[in-house]
Amino acid sequence: MSALIFWLLAICAGIGALAVVMSHDVMRLALGLGLVLLSTAGFFVLLGFGFLALAEVFVYAGGVLVLVLFAIMLVHRGEPGQPSLEVTHDPLILVGCVGVFALLLAVLRPVALQLQTSSGGSVDALGSVLLGDLLLPFELSGLLLLAALVAVVSVMGGDRR
Amino acid sequence: MSALLTGAAWGLAAASLIAVAALIGVWWERKVAGRIQMRFGPQEAGPAGLLQTLSDTLKLMLKEDITPTAADVPVFRAMPFLVFVPVASALVVIPYASGWAPFNIATGAVFFLAVPGLSVLGILLAGWASQNTYASIGGVRAAAQMISYELPRTLSVLSLCLLAGSLSTGTIRAEWRWWWVPLTAVGFLVYFISSIAEVNRGPFDLAEAESELVAGYFTDYSGIRWAIFMMAEYGGVVAASLFGAATFLGGGLGLSGVPGALLFVALTALIATAMIWAKWTFPRMRADQLMTFAWKVLTPMALVQLLAVGIALAARVVLS
Amino acid sequence: MSSLVVSIALFCIGLYAVLTRKEVIAILVGVEVMIAGALLVLVMLGSHAANGASIHAVALLILVLAATEAAVGLGLLVAAARRLSTTCVDEMTEVRG
């Protein structure tokens, strides 16, 4: 059963990723990203990382993707259906990417085969890790978010006289 | 396999609950709105006009399903469902009984806040795919509003999670004590207001402001697809009211058995009626007022609420 | 094993999009796909490790970093599109805006 769901999710992710590579229409591009993000969240659930999946949906599909759509609406005002994005395919880059794929697979395969199956742990354990061992990175990520907020406001509002 | 079947069954149950709630809700809203405006509301079809919504639904189903020529057809057709499904899925994590929700996961409260947020995408893309200026403006407004009000809403629910010591909705209801009500009164107010804004209803209905945008993001939709957008809106109201009554008010204020269940339904209806009341009483806000209200009033209020809950919990530990 | 193939494939498709696309927005979306693939590799390997909760927490922090990157990137994109009136990386040749 979970194998079936896994392959369904894999097909969805594949379609989304191909749309990101091939689409001429900006909106389809963003929809492809949405498909990739949602199927990634599905994979997280399958692997036992429920909270991460919800965070992905909350932050990415509900936040970042909307930001991408906003940016598209502010920047591109083309008609849908008409190609508004240029797509250039380069066989050399394709070969390079396949090479990277083979390399990564060869490096990571032994690691993946060695390990035993468990899961992402309970929410309680996650909370203790975030507020225990990883407290400093956790607080720093809050600081980073604040810095990003200020940065975006200053970049976007800067040209208003 | 069985998990998938149970999930599908609960999804179907949620969709039917929304359909029934929308049938009754539209009638109730028109009645309440009529009374507020010193009219009677619908009263021709059936006793007290009860069958009015049913006949309207039939009419909507028989109407032609128009797709504009300039629209991005597949996206245009799919978007009502992308708006409806996330909203309906919120219903499966609501604790209908103490310690029990249909989909009782350890992170139910996060699910309730995160997954319905996906309908923002549907609304934004519905506006874009229509290729209509009014619809695009409506979609952008709706998205900006929904993202902004998600923050105070999340923070207000967070104070409940802090009190219960859990993110599970079932546990929140099981742990509920009467003194939570005075302690989280401000949080409940924030939750109530930002829930209205989340479902784009008046006085926060800038996304579908008929005096400026015709009907906002669903200007070009007709017939059954338009009805699905309306169902999603009522579904949002139902989910927000059920969740508010089940967690902030502890279901039937902590009562068990039949009186508790009846009180739970009554409190839910009360919250939903208050939402209708707000829509027909307050004038629509301006876009800048809307944002100012979210960021400068509701968010600080929710943060102060969170602080108060934290202090109360600390004081409890120190005193005992 | 198959999830390893899928996540690496996702990463490489994202990489291909980043390398072939000319529009800033498409490159950013490609980067997001790459991050999704990389996160999936981490989580997949983490789901096999004994200390699942630590991997979970690290993945959450990466999610925050990626969201920050996307927000700042999109802000820069809109600002650049306004000032240079182009969204194509090859046409952004001026250093002064």
Image (tube, coloured by chain):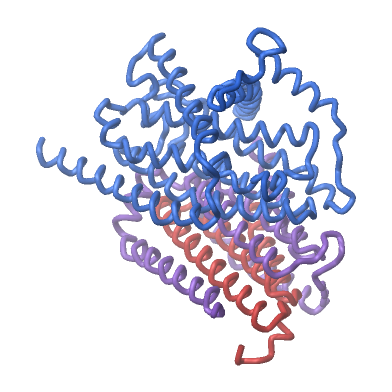
Q: Quadrant of residue A18?
A: bottom right
Q: Position of residue C48 (x, y in %)?
A: 50, 51
- In this orientation, which residue lies closer to the viewer: A139 or A39? A139
Comparing A132 with B18, the one in front is B18
The residue shown at (43%, 56%) is B295
The residue drawn where x is 29% and y is 49% is: B304
Quarter of the image that includes the C terminus of chain B: top left
Vertical placement of A130 versus B283: above or below?
Answer: below
Numbered marks: total = 0
Residue B231 x/y as whole percent: 66, 31
Residue B285, placed above or below residue C32: above
Q: Which chain's colour is blue?
A: B
Of all chains in the rendering, the one displayed in red is C
Q: Is residue C20 left or right of residue A160?
A: right
Q: Report the residue that reaches farthest toward the front.
A: B38
Image position of C10 (left or right of A141):
right
Q: Residue furthest right?
A: B69
Position of the N terminus of chain B by quadrant: top right
Q: Is residue A129 visible?
A: yes
Name the residue nearer the viewer: B1 or B254.
B254
| Residue B2 visible in the displayed image | no
Name the one closer to the observer, A150 or A14: A150
Q: Specify whether B304 is left or right of B228.
A: left
Identified at 41% across, 35% down, the residue is B168
User: Residue B318: percent from the left, percent from the top?
Assistant: 11, 42
Q: What tint does the image give chain A?
A: purple
**Residue A64 placement (x, y as % from top left):** 58, 59
